[in-house]
Image: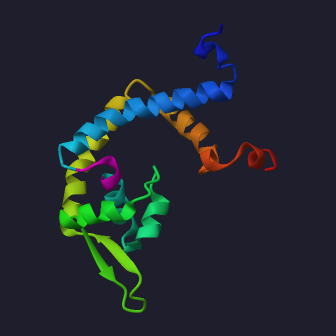
Amino acid sequence: MTSPSSSITTPEHQLYLALQTLASDLSQQPTELLRATGLSTAQFNVLRILRGAGAGLTCGEIGGRLIARDPDVTRLLDRLEHAGLVARTRERRDRRVVTSRISEAGLKLLASLDAPLSRLHAAQFAHLPPEKLELLLTLLREIPPRNREAAPESRETE
């Protein structure tokens, strides 16, 4: 009988597991920092998306920009609106369309998190010299966006 770890023979599988483990490890501290402000990681990401967009976005546009897909963006927006961090309005031209914008309170909350998160990320990668950070970023950027959603057959034809 073989152990589960002995069945991991391909470099791709080893890389996949290493990236999953790293992502899990790296996300714990920011999650704790956000929890202290009452935000979940998903709520934080919605606020950052809205801050970066400048203009308002629809629920579908926000969902398309999330790092981790969340099927219930509407509920995330409900909570953020209830907390005063997001404002939603119906469009005049098409009343079916609801646009979300970050509020002043949301901007202030994000601003208060920018420096602590920056320090945290610097500490998480302090052991890597700048040239290795750049190399790692270069290699990761070579992976096509949303590659994880593509079926193996579709990647073979590209």
Relative to 11, residue 32 above or below: below
Instruction: Indicate left or right for 145 with 22 as reference.
Output: right
How far across and how far down the image is residue 158, in percent? 79, 50
How far across and how far down the image is residue 65, in percent? 47, 60
Among the 4 quarters of the image, the one containing residue 86: bottom left
For the N terminus, give its image quadrant: top right
Foreground residue among 147 and 94 = 94
Q: Which residues are magenta?
A: 39-43
How far across and how far down the image is residue 98, in percent? 37, 78
Q: Pick out the residue farthest to the front.
A: 1
Instruction: Indicate left or right for 62 with 138 as reference.
Output: left
Q: How many marks?
A: 0
Q: Residue at x 41, y 32 (%)?
A: 24
Q: Is residue 12 magenta?
A: no
Q: Pick out the residue farthest to the bottom.
A: 93
Relative to 155, residue 129 above or below: above
How far across and how far down the image is residue 38, in percent? 19, 49
Q: Residue at x 23, y 69 (%)?
A: 103
Relative to 78, residue 90 above or below: below
Q: Residue at x 46, y 68 (%)?
A: 60
Query: Predominant secondary structure in magenta?
Result: helix
Q: Is residue 119 visible?
A: no
Among the 4 quarters of the image, the one containing residue 23: top left
Q: Is residue 40 magenta?
A: yes
Among the 4 quarters of the image, the one containing residue 62: bottom left
Q: Pick out the residue farthest to the top.
A: 1
